[in-house]
Image (cartoon, rainbow, N blue to C red):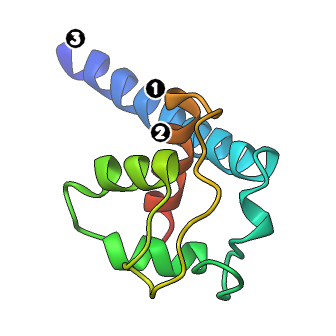
């Protein structure tokens, strides 16, 4: 009986994680992040896949990137600063977007 519950819980968490990642992508587009960040190629800012690769395996990446998205930042991919900072985007939306980026392989 407990194994069945564990299997159902695992499936639900997997589904929720996928839905969460999709929300992150939609929020990324909605908040015009695509104006500076392309999925595969550097434009004004680094490519989304390059960000994901750089922070892959970094347990502190989620928190670091949330701060960079909120306040802006520079130095990780060159001297160009991330402008504008995103003070009007909610913490939950930033968290969703960063989670989506970090889940990209």
Residue at image point 71% right, 85% down? 43
Say which element carries label 1. helix
Residue at image point 22% right, 11% down? 1
Say which element carries label 3. loop
Q: Nearer the viewer, mark 1 or mark 3?
A: 1
Distance from disc 1 to disc 3, alpha carbons, whole Å, reads 17 Å
Q: Which mark is residue 96?
A: none
Q: Which mark is residue 12?
A: 1
Q: Nearer the viewer, mark 2 or mark 3?
A: 2
Mark 2 burial class by Cα count in 10 Å: few <14, some 14-19, many 20+: some
Q: Which residue is mark 2?
A: 95
Q: Nearer the viewer, mark 1 or mark 2?
A: 2
Most extreme residue toward the top, as rendered? 1
Say which element carries label 2. helix
Specify the quadrant of the image occupied by residue 52: bottom left
* Closer to us: 72 or 100: 72
Please say if 15 is above or below 83. Answer: above
Q: Residue 101 in the image: x percent, y percent?
A: 52, 60
Q: Which residue is mark 3?
A: 1
Distance from disc 2 to disc 3, alpha carbons, whole Å, reads 35 Å
């Amino acid at each position: 009986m407990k194994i069945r519950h564990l299997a159902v819980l695992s499936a639900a968490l997997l589904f929720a994680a996928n839905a969460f990642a999709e929300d992150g992508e939609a929020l990324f587009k909605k908040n015009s992040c695509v104006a500076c960040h392309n999925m595969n190629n550097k434009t004004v800012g680094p490519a989304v896949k390059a960000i994901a690769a750089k922070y892959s395996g970094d347990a502190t990446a989620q928190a670091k990137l949330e701060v960079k998205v909120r306040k802006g930042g520079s130095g990780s991919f060159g001297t160009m600063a991330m402008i504008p900072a995103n003070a009007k985007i909610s913490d939950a939306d930033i968290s969703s977007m960063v989670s989506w980026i970090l889940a990209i392989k």
